[in-house]
Amino acid sequence: MNESIYGLKTEYVRDEIGKCESVDELIEKIFPLISTQKEAWKIKIGELFEKSGLTKKAFAARCKVSRPTLDDWLLNGVLPRDREKFIRIALATGLDEDETNRLLQRYGRYPELYSKSLEDCICIYVLNNYPDDPLEKYDFILERIKEKLVNTSSGQGEWNVSTVRLDRQVSEIRSDDELERFIEDNTDVFSGAYEKLYRYVMACIKSNCLDRKYADNVHEMALAQNWSSSLTQCVSAIRRRKWYPTRNKIISLGLHLSLDHDQIDKMLNLAHMEPLCAKNHFECVVIFILEDASLNDIINTDSEDFDPDDLCRYARDILGQVDIPEIRTFLSEIAEKDDEW
């Protein structure tokens, strides 16, 4: 790998973001510093597409994206907008477990496969046992097992199991029946993988919402603060311990809850994800929003003027000034009910 692509330290980029006084300055000074990540991805996805031997239409379908999205990857170096897309690309192109982990970490800035995640556990099993048709097998097993897991979790079993132990057990599974038994035996491990995240989110909801009467009624709070239906469903699922978090949903949740940079990083950590990445164009803008909001006292929950809607309003304004595909997709997460994106 060309060191010039990854030689720029993330800490340096993050410090430079903090010095920007406007989104225009951010685009002018910071975006050129991180454009190399797009170039690296453009080269990598081109290699993987060629390796697949598929047509563009077939490759896009396997990755569950549109043809224009695939063209954005191949021609413009636009990064996939979530971790699942990177995993599907790995499965579609026949990468092994180590190669998949490198793809996730190096290009997506996401953590490697994690055996306490249901989807990742199935992915690890498939990569180790079905090198010839991993994607079809992954979809088949996940569809068959996921609903069963949600319906059978008792919430009473052991969930804080050693990841090392689980990694070893997953690596030793050799048949679909063994996998299904393993998942049934560890239902509460998978359901409890995000228990600390659930608790943290609910604590933030109770401490940061403006009117304390909404603290125990997600529906009323969602109506009062004009939450999107997807966000309302997300928080309701958290209360029922049935939410499998995605990175952008966590970021959206953090903005709705008026969390600062460190708090959103903590949520990401509790979801077994990397902190906000200064070298990702979209997350670079999010970091700018959070740092600027903090400096301007927008997220000071102790202030008499604190309004829980202010951070989302400010984020919508800033993000609306930056035209990149990832942001266009994300805006629907923080749209007001009357807005159409």
Image: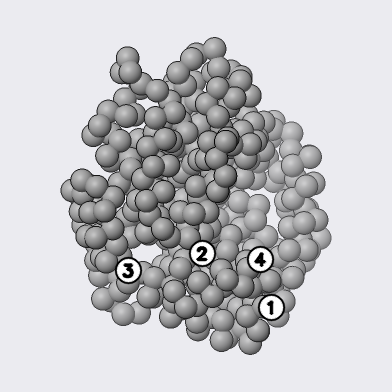
| Label 1 Cα crowd, 10 Å radius (few <14 / some 14-19 / many 20+) | few
Residue 248 versus residue 112 in the image, above or below: above
Q: CA distance from mark 4 to mark 1?
A: 10 Å
Q: Provide the residue designation for mark 3.
A: 35
Q: CA distance from mark 4 to mark 2?
A: 11 Å
Q: CA distance from mark 2 to mark 1?
A: 17 Å
Q: Of label 4 and label 1, which has the lower sequence position?
A: 1
Q: Of label 3 and label 2, which has the lower sequence position?
A: 3
Q: Are marks 3 and 4 in contact (CB under 8 Å)?
A: no
Q: Of label 2 and label 1, which has the lower sequence position?
A: 1
Q: Amino acid at mark 4?
A: Lys
Q: Provide the residue designation for mark 4.
A: 64
Q: Are marks 3 and 1 in contact (CB under 8 Å)?
A: no
User: How far across and down, in percent of the image, does residue 277 sit?
Assistant: 36, 54
Q: Provide the residue designation for mark 1.
A: 58
| Label 2 Cα crowd, 10 Å radius (few <14 / some 14-19 / many 20+) | many
Q: Amino acid at mark 2?
A: Pro
Residue at x 59%, y 55% (from the top left corner): 115
Q: Amino acid at mark 3?
A: Ser
Q: Provide the residue designation for mark 2.
A: 80
